[in-house]
Image (cartoon, rainbow, N blue to C red):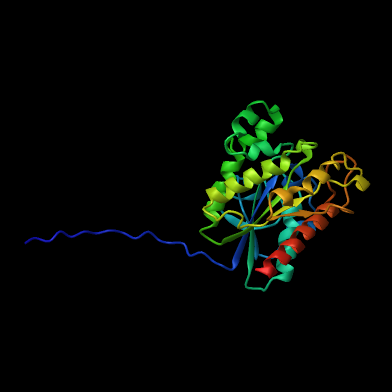
Amino acid sequence: MGFVLISFTIGKLQAQDENFYIFLSFGQSNMEGHAKFEEIDTVVDDRFQVLQTVDCENLDRVKGNWYPAAAPLTRCYTGLGPSDYFGRTLLDNLPEHIKVGVINVSVGGTKIELFQKDNYQSYVATAPGWLQNMVEEYDGDPYGRLIEMAKLAQQHGVIKGILLHQGESNTGDQTWPTKVKGVYDTMLSDLGLNPNSLPLLAGEMVSEAQGGKCASMNDIIKTLPEVLPTAHVISSEDCEAVDDGLHFSAAGYRELGRRYGIKMLEILNKD
């Protein structure tokens, strides 16, 4: 009786670090980072990391690699946004053995429709050229790039939440909360996560007191938790804005980011 020798190779497995907390960020220009960052925004603890979502020669960063989360966190020439001080706030309050990672895929001026997996192509086809150019930096599919990078990140750590700042381009759209819920549900399904298993933090537009041109959208954003119970709204009150009435100043982004961080800490402490 002969014997057949069967050989096989077990691929090298990447151990998932449960002490590496990962957060997904998406939205339009305020999440992308509109303010010019300053030197203090480029100094960061190595425990705060960003997963690069596009190649950036000017930053010496390559897509799919982790780097210290010094601004800019989105693309090669974007600015300061809420994710920057969200991560710093977490590190200031979490045990030293915890690391924090962010993945930011955002496109200035876009409607929430860009992140609808089954609808984005028709939206992009009719979008202005400048928006199409930004979308092309993600090979035409920002949502797909976010999921691609999130799946890679799941090999390294644990996704703990989602950050959203979007709505200016959907101002007055009463169906926005339902659309956000659809994106959220699809995202969790694509990542193999249980329904409603992640908190989603959604920031308000520039407030009326700060001259916000889209401040009326805040009333719609406030209804998001009624549609999506895991959603939490982050107030923009007293977050300094710039003269265009759409974007925050660097100081405003730092404060808004801290508020995202404080809310996430409350949620994490409940788990």
Q: Residue furthest left?
A: 1
Q: Quadrant of the C terminus?
A: bottom right
Q: Position of residue 165 (x, y in %)?
A: 74, 47
Residue at x 56%, y 47% (from the top left corner): 147
Q: Nearer the viewer, residue 185 or 80?
A: 185
Q: Quadrant of residue 98?
A: bottom right
Q: Is residue 219 left or right of residue 137?
A: right
Q: Is residue 228 left or right of residue 16?
A: right
Asked if residue 106 shows in the view, the reply is no
Q: Is residue 76 above or below residue 41?
A: above
Q: Position of residue 89 (x, y in %)?
A: 75, 64
Q: Quadrant of the N terminus?
A: bottom left
Q: Nearer the viewer, residue 121 or 155?
A: 121
Residue at x 67%, y 73% (from the top left corner): 95
Q: Residue furthest top?
A: 126
Q: Quadrant of residue 162?
A: bottom right
Q: Position of residue 253 (x, y in %)?
A: 81, 53
Q: Is residue 74 above or below residue 128?
A: below
Residue at x 78%, y 46% (from the top left corner): 221
Q: Position of residue 41 (x, y in %)?
A: 77, 57
Residue at x 72%, y 40% (from the top left corner): 176
Q: Is residue 207 above or below residue 50?
A: above
